[in-house]
Amino acid sequence: MKNVFLPLIALVLCFGCTSNVSDNKIKEELVEYALLTPTDFRQRISEAPIAYLPLGTLEWHGEHLPLGSDGLQSFEFMKLLAREAGGIVLPMLFLGPDSVRVIDGETYYGMDHFLNQEGRREYYPEQQLDGSCYWVPDELFKSMLENTISQLARAGFKIIVAHGHGPSTQTVLKYWDEWEQKYEVMIFTAWAWNVRGESDEQASNRAREGIGIMTDHAATNETSLMMYFYPELIRMDLLPEDTASWPVGVWGVDPRLHASSELGKEAVDYHLHRMKGVLQGALESLD
Protein backbone atom coordinates (compact mmCIF):
# COMPACT_ATOMS: atom_id res chain seq x y z
CA MET A 1 0.00 0.00 0.00
CA LYS A 2 2.85 2.37 0.81
CA ASN A 3 4.32 1.85 -2.64
CA VAL A 4 1.00 2.81 -4.23
CA PHE A 5 0.79 6.16 -2.43
CA LEU A 6 4.44 7.21 -2.67
CA PRO A 7 4.17 8.38 -6.33
CA LEU A 8 0.95 10.22 -5.49
CA ILE A 9 2.56 11.97 -2.54
CA ALA A 10 5.55 12.91 -4.69
CA LEU A 11 3.21 14.28 -7.36
CA VAL A 12 1.34 16.40 -4.82
CA LEU A 13 4.61 17.74 -3.43
CA CYS A 14 5.80 18.50 -6.93
CA PHE A 15 2.66 20.49 -7.71
CA GLY A 16 3.12 22.35 -4.45
CA CYS A 17 6.64 23.31 -5.44
CA THR A 18 5.48 24.49 -8.85
CA SER A 19 2.75 26.58 -7.28
CA ASN A 20 5.20 28.23 -4.87
CA VAL A 21 7.59 29.07 -7.70
CA SER A 22 4.71 30.52 -9.70
CA ASP A 23 3.45 32.53 -6.72
CA ASN A 24 6.93 33.92 -6.07
CA LYS A 25 7.30 34.88 -9.72
CA ILE A 26 3.98 36.71 -9.68
CA LYS A 27 4.90 38.46 -6.43
CA GLU A 28 8.20 39.65 -7.87
CA GLU A 29 6.35 41.23 -10.80
CA LEU A 30 3.73 43.11 -8.76
CA VAL A 31 3.94 46.83 -9.50
CA GLU A 32 0.42 47.99 -8.57
CA TYR A 33 0.46 50.27 -5.51
CA ALA A 34 -2.79 48.87 -4.12
CA LEU A 35 -1.48 45.29 -4.12
CA LEU A 36 1.84 45.90 -2.40
CA THR A 37 2.56 45.18 1.25
CA PRO A 38 4.68 47.78 3.08
CA THR A 39 7.65 45.45 2.65
CA ASP A 40 7.03 45.25 -1.11
CA PHE A 41 6.59 49.02 -1.22
CA ARG A 42 9.83 49.73 0.60
CA GLN A 43 11.76 47.44 -1.71
CA ARG A 44 10.39 48.89 -4.94
CA ILE A 45 10.69 52.54 -3.95
CA SER A 46 14.26 52.00 -2.73
CA GLU A 47 15.18 50.55 -6.12
CA ALA A 48 13.41 53.24 -8.17
CA PRO A 49 11.39 56.05 -6.52
CA ILE A 50 9.08 56.43 -9.54
CA ALA A 51 5.29 56.77 -9.26
CA TYR A 52 3.03 56.25 -12.27
CA LEU A 53 -0.36 57.98 -12.27
CA PRO A 54 -2.83 56.76 -14.95
CA LEU A 55 -5.21 59.58 -15.85
CA GLY A 56 -8.47 58.04 -16.94
CA THR A 57 -12.11 58.83 -17.59
CA LEU A 58 -15.42 57.09 -18.02
CA GLU A 59 -16.01 58.57 -21.45
CA TRP A 60 -17.46 57.74 -24.84
CA HIS A 61 -14.76 56.32 -27.11
CA GLY A 62 -16.91 55.45 -30.09
CA GLU A 63 -19.28 52.51 -30.16
CA HIS A 64 -16.35 50.11 -30.43
CA LEU A 65 -14.20 50.86 -27.36
CA PRO A 66 -14.85 50.56 -23.60
CA LEU A 67 -15.85 53.68 -21.70
CA GLY A 68 -12.77 53.35 -19.49
CA SER A 69 -10.32 53.25 -22.41
CA ASP A 70 -8.24 56.24 -21.25
CA GLY A 71 -7.40 54.72 -17.90
CA LEU A 72 -7.06 51.20 -19.25
CA GLN A 73 -4.47 52.23 -21.83
CA SER A 74 -2.37 54.32 -19.49
CA PHE A 75 -2.60 51.74 -16.68
CA GLU A 76 -1.46 48.85 -18.86
CA PHE A 77 1.34 50.87 -20.46
CA MET A 78 2.55 52.04 -17.06
CA LYS A 79 2.59 48.51 -15.63
CA LEU A 80 4.85 47.42 -18.47
CA LEU A 81 7.03 50.50 -18.02
CA ALA A 82 7.29 49.93 -14.26
CA ARG A 83 8.56 46.41 -14.90
CA GLU A 84 11.13 47.81 -17.32
CA ALA A 85 12.25 50.94 -15.48
CA GLY A 86 11.16 50.27 -11.90
CA GLY A 87 8.61 52.08 -9.79
CA ILE A 88 5.01 51.70 -8.63
CA VAL A 89 1.72 52.20 -10.50
CA LEU A 90 -1.15 53.98 -8.77
CA PRO A 91 -4.81 53.03 -9.33
CA MET A 92 -6.52 54.55 -12.35
CA LEU A 93 -8.13 57.95 -11.86
CA PHE A 94 -11.56 58.22 -13.49
CA LEU A 95 -12.33 61.91 -12.96
CA GLY A 96 -10.92 64.63 -15.19
CA PRO A 97 -11.42 68.09 -16.71
CA ASP A 98 -12.66 68.85 -20.22
CA SER A 99 -14.17 71.59 -22.33
CA VAL A 100 -17.70 72.71 -21.45
CA ARG A 101 -20.39 74.38 -23.56
CA VAL A 102 -23.92 75.39 -22.70
CA ILE A 103 -26.20 75.26 -25.78
CA ASP A 104 -29.91 76.09 -25.53
CA GLY A 105 -29.76 75.60 -21.79
CA GLU A 106 -28.12 72.16 -21.99
CA THR A 107 -24.55 71.51 -20.77
CA TYR A 108 -22.20 69.44 -22.91
CA TYR A 109 -18.76 68.12 -21.97
CA GLY A 110 -15.79 67.13 -24.11
CA MET A 111 -16.75 64.89 -27.01
CA ASP A 112 -20.42 65.81 -26.52
CA HIS A 113 -19.66 68.97 -28.49
CA PHE A 114 -15.99 68.85 -29.52
CA LEU A 115 -16.65 67.86 -33.16
CA ASN A 116 -19.89 69.72 -33.84
CA GLN A 117 -18.44 72.21 -36.33
CA GLU A 118 -20.42 71.77 -39.55
CA GLY A 119 -18.40 71.03 -42.66
CA ARG A 120 -15.72 68.95 -40.96
CA ARG A 121 -15.43 65.25 -41.66
CA GLU A 122 -16.16 64.20 -38.09
CA TYR A 123 -19.22 66.46 -37.62
CA TYR A 124 -22.17 65.38 -35.53
CA PRO A 125 -24.68 67.55 -33.64
CA GLU A 126 -23.93 68.23 -29.99
CA GLN A 127 -25.43 65.49 -27.84
CA GLN A 128 -25.01 63.79 -24.49
CA LEU A 129 -22.95 60.76 -25.45
CA ASP A 130 -23.97 57.60 -23.64
CA GLY A 131 -21.85 56.56 -20.68
CA SER A 132 -19.72 59.69 -20.28
CA CYS A 133 -19.49 60.31 -16.54
CA TYR A 134 -16.19 61.85 -15.46
CA TRP A 135 -16.13 65.65 -15.63
CA VAL A 136 -14.88 67.84 -12.80
CA PRO A 137 -13.99 71.57 -12.97
CA ASP A 138 -10.42 72.55 -13.82
CA GLU A 139 -9.66 73.95 -10.37
CA LEU A 140 -10.97 70.85 -8.60
CA PHE A 141 -8.90 68.58 -10.84
CA LYS A 142 -5.83 70.73 -10.31
CA SER A 143 -6.36 70.45 -6.54
CA MET A 144 -6.82 66.66 -6.76
CA LEU A 145 -3.68 66.28 -8.84
CA GLU A 146 -1.58 68.61 -6.71
CA ASN A 147 -2.62 66.89 -3.50
CA THR A 148 -1.79 63.52 -5.04
CA ILE A 149 1.67 64.77 -6.02
CA SER A 150 2.13 66.22 -2.53
CA GLN A 151 1.29 62.86 -0.98
CA LEU A 152 3.56 60.98 -3.37
CA ALA A 153 6.45 63.29 -2.51
CA ARG A 154 5.73 62.72 1.20
CA ALA A 155 5.77 58.95 0.60
CA GLY A 156 9.27 59.22 -0.84
CA PHE A 157 8.77 59.33 -4.60
CA LYS A 158 11.17 61.55 -6.55
CA ILE A 159 9.85 61.00 -10.09
CA ILE A 160 6.20 61.06 -11.22
CA VAL A 161 4.87 59.97 -14.61
CA ALA A 162 1.27 61.14 -15.16
CA HIS A 163 -0.44 60.35 -18.45
CA GLY A 164 -3.77 59.49 -20.02
CA HIS A 165 -6.87 61.53 -20.86
CA GLY A 166 -5.82 64.50 -23.00
CA PRO A 167 -7.16 67.43 -20.90
CA SER A 168 -5.91 65.73 -17.72
CA THR A 169 -2.43 65.35 -19.17
CA GLN A 170 -2.54 68.96 -20.36
CA THR A 171 -3.14 69.99 -16.74
CA VAL A 172 0.07 68.20 -15.77
CA LEU A 173 1.94 70.07 -18.49
CA LYS A 174 0.46 73.38 -17.37
CA TYR A 175 1.65 73.08 -13.77
CA TRP A 176 4.61 70.67 -13.88
CA ASP A 177 7.25 73.35 -13.38
CA GLU A 178 5.42 74.86 -10.40
CA TRP A 179 4.86 71.45 -8.79
CA GLU A 180 8.41 70.28 -9.39
CA GLN A 181 9.80 73.23 -7.51
CA LYS A 182 7.20 73.12 -4.75
CA TYR A 183 7.43 69.37 -4.01
CA GLU A 184 11.01 68.63 -5.13
CA VAL A 185 10.01 65.96 -7.63
CA MET A 186 10.53 65.43 -11.37
CA ILE A 187 7.34 65.18 -13.43
CA PHE A 188 6.91 63.54 -16.83
CA THR A 189 4.18 62.65 -19.29
CA ALA A 190 4.50 60.00 -22.00
CA TRP A 191 3.83 62.35 -24.91
CA ALA A 192 6.84 62.63 -27.17
CA TRP A 193 6.59 66.32 -27.89
CA ASN A 194 6.25 67.69 -24.38
CA VAL A 195 7.94 65.49 -21.82
CA ARG A 196 8.52 68.11 -19.13
CA GLY A 197 8.16 70.78 -21.81
CA GLU A 198 10.84 69.27 -24.03
CA SER A 199 10.52 67.89 -27.56
CA ASP A 200 11.69 64.61 -29.05
CA GLU A 201 11.53 65.20 -32.81
CA GLN A 202 11.99 61.58 -33.82
CA ALA A 203 9.32 60.36 -31.43
CA SER A 204 7.01 63.19 -32.52
CA ASN A 205 7.30 62.04 -36.12
CA ARG A 206 6.54 58.45 -35.07
CA ALA A 207 3.47 59.68 -33.20
CA ARG A 208 2.19 61.27 -36.40
CA GLU A 209 2.52 57.84 -38.00
CA GLY A 210 0.28 56.36 -35.30
CA ILE A 211 3.16 55.21 -33.10
CA GLY A 212 2.14 57.17 -30.03
CA ILE A 213 0.58 56.72 -26.61
CA MET A 214 -2.96 58.10 -26.72
CA THR A 215 -2.59 60.71 -29.45
CA ASP A 216 -6.14 60.71 -30.88
CA HIS A 217 -9.63 59.95 -29.62
CA ALA A 218 -10.89 56.44 -30.30
CA ALA A 219 -9.26 56.51 -33.74
CA THR A 220 -6.34 54.44 -35.08
CA ASN A 221 -3.92 55.05 -32.21
CA GLU A 222 -6.21 54.43 -29.25
CA THR A 223 -8.02 51.60 -31.01
CA SER A 224 -4.71 49.90 -31.83
CA LEU A 225 -3.53 50.24 -28.22
CA MET A 226 -6.79 48.76 -26.95
CA MET A 227 -6.57 45.96 -29.52
CA TYR A 228 -3.14 45.13 -28.12
CA PHE A 229 -4.05 45.40 -24.43
CA TYR A 230 -7.69 44.21 -24.46
CA PRO A 231 -8.50 42.49 -27.77
CA GLU A 232 -11.52 40.73 -26.27
CA LEU A 233 -13.24 44.06 -25.51
CA ILE A 234 -13.03 45.65 -28.97
CA ARG A 235 -16.21 45.70 -31.07
CA MET A 236 -15.27 46.93 -34.54
CA ASP A 237 -18.50 45.37 -35.82
CA LEU A 238 -20.43 48.17 -34.06
CA LEU A 239 -18.91 50.86 -36.30
CA PRO A 240 -20.52 51.77 -39.64
CA GLU A 241 -19.36 49.41 -42.39
CA ASP A 242 -19.48 52.25 -44.91
CA THR A 243 -16.26 54.22 -44.43
CA ALA A 244 -17.96 57.25 -45.97
CA SER A 245 -20.03 57.36 -42.79
CA TRP A 246 -17.82 58.69 -39.99
CA PRO A 247 -18.23 57.12 -36.50
CA VAL A 248 -19.67 59.43 -33.86
CA GLY A 249 -17.14 60.71 -31.32
CA VAL A 250 -14.02 59.51 -33.14
CA TRP A 251 -11.20 61.97 -33.89
CA GLY A 252 -8.14 61.00 -35.90
CA VAL A 253 -7.24 58.47 -38.59
CA ASP A 254 -10.03 56.02 -39.45
CA PRO A 255 -9.62 52.98 -37.16
CA ARG A 256 -11.66 50.78 -39.50
CA LEU A 257 -8.96 51.08 -42.14
CA HIS A 258 -5.75 51.33 -40.15
CA ALA A 259 -6.08 50.08 -36.56
CA SER A 260 -4.47 46.78 -35.57
CA SER A 261 -3.02 45.03 -32.54
CA GLU A 262 0.30 44.93 -34.40
CA LEU A 263 0.33 48.73 -34.64
CA GLY A 264 -0.56 48.91 -30.95
CA LYS A 265 2.33 46.63 -30.04
CA GLU A 266 4.73 48.67 -32.17
CA ALA A 267 3.66 51.86 -30.38
CA VAL A 268 3.98 50.27 -26.95
CA ASP A 269 7.40 48.74 -27.66
CA TYR A 270 8.74 52.00 -29.11
CA HIS A 271 7.62 54.16 -26.20
CA LEU A 272 8.62 51.61 -23.56
CA HIS A 273 12.16 51.84 -24.89
CA ARG A 274 12.00 55.64 -25.15
CA MET A 275 10.49 56.23 -21.72
CA LYS A 276 12.82 53.73 -20.07
CA GLY A 277 15.73 55.82 -21.32
CA VAL A 278 14.09 59.03 -20.11
CA LEU A 279 13.51 57.59 -16.64
CA GLN A 280 16.95 56.05 -16.35
CA GLY A 281 18.38 59.49 -17.10
CA ALA A 282 16.15 60.99 -14.41
CA LEU A 283 17.24 58.40 -11.86
CA GLU A 284 20.89 59.07 -12.65
CA SER A 285 20.33 62.80 -12.19
CA LEU A 286 19.01 62.14 -8.68
CA ASP A 287 22.35 60.55 -7.76
Image (tube, rainbow, N blue to C red):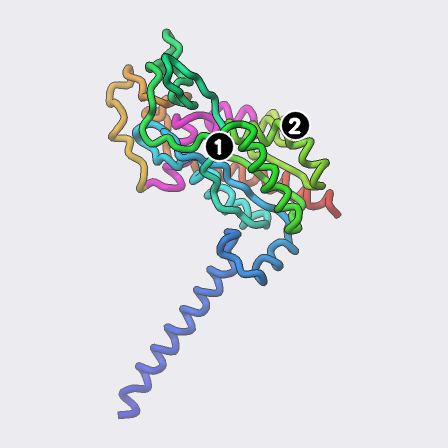
- Identify the residue at horizontal 53%, vertical 47% (top origin): 89
**Within the magenta stretch, is there residue 253?**
no
Identify the amino acid type marked 1.
Gly
- Identify the residue at horizontal 25%, vertical 19% (top origin): 242
- In percent of width and height, residue 96 lies at 48, 32
Q: Is residue 118 visible?
A: yes
Q: Nearer the viewer, residue 4 or 36?
A: 36
In the rendered image of this protein, does residue 147 appear above or below residue 173?
A: below
Q: Nearer the viewer, residue 282 or 207?
A: 282
In the rendered image of this protein, does residue 211 appear above or below residue 287?
A: above
- Foreground mark, 1 or 2, reads 1
**Position of the N terminus by quadrant:** bottom left
Question: In the displayed structure, does residue 62 sit left or right of residue 268?
Answer: left
Q: Is residue 263 visible?
A: no
Seen as rendered, the residue at the extreme top is 119
- Identify the residue at horizontal 37%, vertical 18% (top origin): 106
The residue that disc 1 covers is: 96
Q: Residues within 10 Å of mark 2 (few under 14, many from 20)?
A: few
Identify the amino acid type marked 2.
Glu
The magenta segment is 204-231
Question: In the displayed structure, does residue 27 sit left or right of residue 152?
Answer: left
Any mark on residue 198, and which?
2
Any mark on residue 65, and which?
none
Counting every numbered tag in the picture gives 2
The picture quadrant where one finds residue 272 is top right
